[in-house]
Amino acid sequence: MAFDLVQYFAEQIHLQKPELLNQYDPSERKSHLLEINTLSLGKLITLWRTDENKLYQEIQSQDQLYVVDIARHLTTSDQNHSKLSKPEFEHTMTEVLSLQLAELKQLDDTGNYGIKGLRELITGQVEHLSGQAEDWIWSTNELTELKGSKPIPEEEISLEETMKEFNQMVHQNAVEHHEQVAEVEKTAVPTWAKVLEPVVALAILWVLYSAATQMFA
């Protein structure tokens, strides 16, 4: 697995660019910078795949016009759904992308990566980027194989809500059982009626016998 540039760049942004988006509260600032970081790194991956020789040369030359052009392209993309205003998005993207290219050059210089080593490092970041951002990020930087990689958070159900649903189920079952018993009792023949059936039959026979005796007497 390649060295995790996602977290490495996040730490470098925190250390080297503390002024970026510092007008936002810490949690919101962190969220915006994570989007910019993943968007920028993802774009470097797609640029490398398109023409690795050109991107390697740009890493070596650190041409600011090249950086500005990429930042502007990402800013004006129809797929870009960032909540940042376009000016602050473009400025932040330019700063972060410049930092990433500078760090990649430093890693290349100190580690003697060369084009083959940087290929493995940069293209290997797909695994680290997976699940790190919303789908619009991957549409914007054209790293579309990562769309749908961010898990959808499941709604947490409290114990109180669970017990409430359980009690409702128990109550409903009790009502249905009571209704079934009542229906059975309504249609069933009482036990006492079954016991008296022979007695009633004998009484009827006795009445009939007495009437017949009187007729023929």
Image (tube, helix red, strand yellow):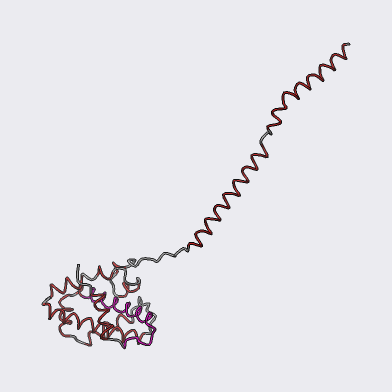
Q: Which residues are magenta?
A: 19-47
Tell me: 181 left or right of 200. left
Magenta residues, dominant SS class: helix
| Above or below, comparing residue 169 to residue 59 in the picture | above
| Above or below, comparing residue 180 to residue 134 in the picture | above
The residue at the far top in this view is 217
Question: Depth check: 92 or 173 in front?
Answer: 173
Q: Residue at x 69, y 29 (%)?
A: 194
| Above or below, comparing residue 140 to residue 211 in the picture | below
Tell me: 51 left or right of 94. left
| Image mark count | 0
Please say whether residue 29 is one of the residues in the magenta stretch.
Answer: yes
Location of the N terminus by quadrant is bottom left
Question: Depth check: 177 or 13 in front?
Answer: 177
Give residue 54's position: percent from left, percent from top.
17, 79
Residue 58 occupies which quadrant of the picture? Answer: bottom left
Question: Depth check: 152 or 141 in front?
Answer: 152
Please say whether residue 133 is one of the residues in the magenta stretch.
Answer: no
Give residue 66's position: percent from left, percent from top.
22, 84
Give residue 205's position: percent from left, percent from top.
78, 19
Location of the C terminus by quadrant is top right
Residue 15 occupies which quadrant of the picture? Answer: bottom left
Residue 96 occupies which quadrant of the picture? Answer: bottom left
Q: Residue at x 38, y 77 (%)?
A: 81
Give residue 53's position: percent from left, percent from top.
15, 77
